Amino acid sequence: MKKRFLAGLCMMGMIATMLMGCGGTASTSEPAAEEPAAETEASDAAEETTTAGGDYKIALITMDSIDQHWVTLNEGAQAEATKQGVTVDFMSPDTKDDSKQIECVNNAVAGGYDAIMVAANGPDAISGALQEAIDAGIKVVYVDSPANVTAEATFSTDNKAAGKTAGEEMIKALEAKGITSGDIGIVNVNASTQSTVDREAGFREAFDGSDFNILETQYCDGDAAKGQSIAENYITQGVVGIFGGNEGSTTGAGNAIKASGNADIVGVGFDKSDSIKGLITDGYLLCTMAQNPDVMGSLGVDACVKALNGESLGGAVTDTGVTVLNKDNVN
């Protein structure tokens, strides 16, 4: 009861700061109403044994609040929050930025949140803020991309394996065209986000022993317009294939191939959005590695509730899987 009373006092003062500073939006789940001041000892005892019922507040902090991947992850989290009777606030930055993500974590701590679900923009920058949250008694669960701090659990794609699959799909498509050598470009997010770094490593591994040459990676910070510009530059160099490491990178690569009019360039990417699905349907991308962000969000909330109820999760890492989405199954 003491914890809820303190949270109530600070909530009105903190909520505007949290949402403006992090570019986030509050969940549709309503927090529990304040109880009357006069309570019986019996009702207090019953309250203490309640496992959830809206008492737990969970902050969902992803890399940004714009990419469809994160929007879908939040949808999965909100569905599970409704099922569990807890509150999840999507309070992510409006763009990929370490300082903004750290600010969101600090706001969650100051706002009295019980748990934080986070997709770390990079493994190092956010680690100090997360450790302070853990030291303050807040449970931390990773979704999609972890930091270098031990959390209760992690729910993510096996990114290296999925990246290797992307490379294998590109090789098969190139060989079907009679192309067995040539340059290949990679458009990635940055050099520090572990999930996309792992995807690139797996993709490169698929070409070991082949006659293809993987060019130096170029970074677009996940911005589709920047990704398109990079991909267009690759195309002027005569590449036979382009790999996009996330939603924005993949969209940019597909748009560049479309603009070039060169149907022989094989584009392969990561993540799923309406734009990416349209580029696959129209033949400008071969396929994309479609993750399951809704599953990450759902399992993340469930793990938070279990941890808050005293269950030990042992820092387990769960692979939430991918599907190779191509023209045959895009719809």
Image (cartoon, rainbow, N blue to C red):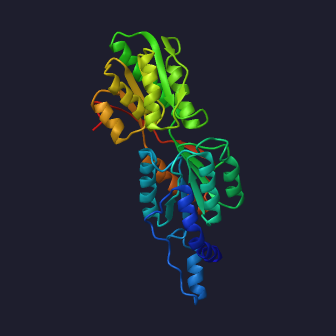
Residue 262 image offset from top left, x and y in percent: 32, 19
Q: Quadrant of the C terminus?
A: top left
Q: Is residue 327 left or right of residue 26?
A: left
Any part of residue 215 in sight: yes
Q: Position of residue 296 (x, y in %)?
A: 48, 48
Side (left or right) of 288 relative to 150? left
Could you tell me residue 188's position as x and y percent? 51, 31
Count of marks overlaid on the render: 0
Q: Is residue 11 above or below residue 126?
A: below
- Residue 104 placed where, x, y %? 59, 56
> Which quadrant would the N terminus be assigned to in this image?
bottom right
- Residue at point 46%, 61% (across, down): 81
Q: Is residue 36 above or below residue 59?
A: below
Which residue is rendered at x = 46% and y = 70% of the image?
A: 30
Residue 303: name its quadrant.
Answer: bottom right
Q: Residue at x 58, y 90 (%)?
A: 38
Residue 305 in sight from this viewpoint: no
User: Is the residue 175 above or below the residue 251 in the image?
Assistant: above
What's the residue at 49%, 20% (across, down)?
206
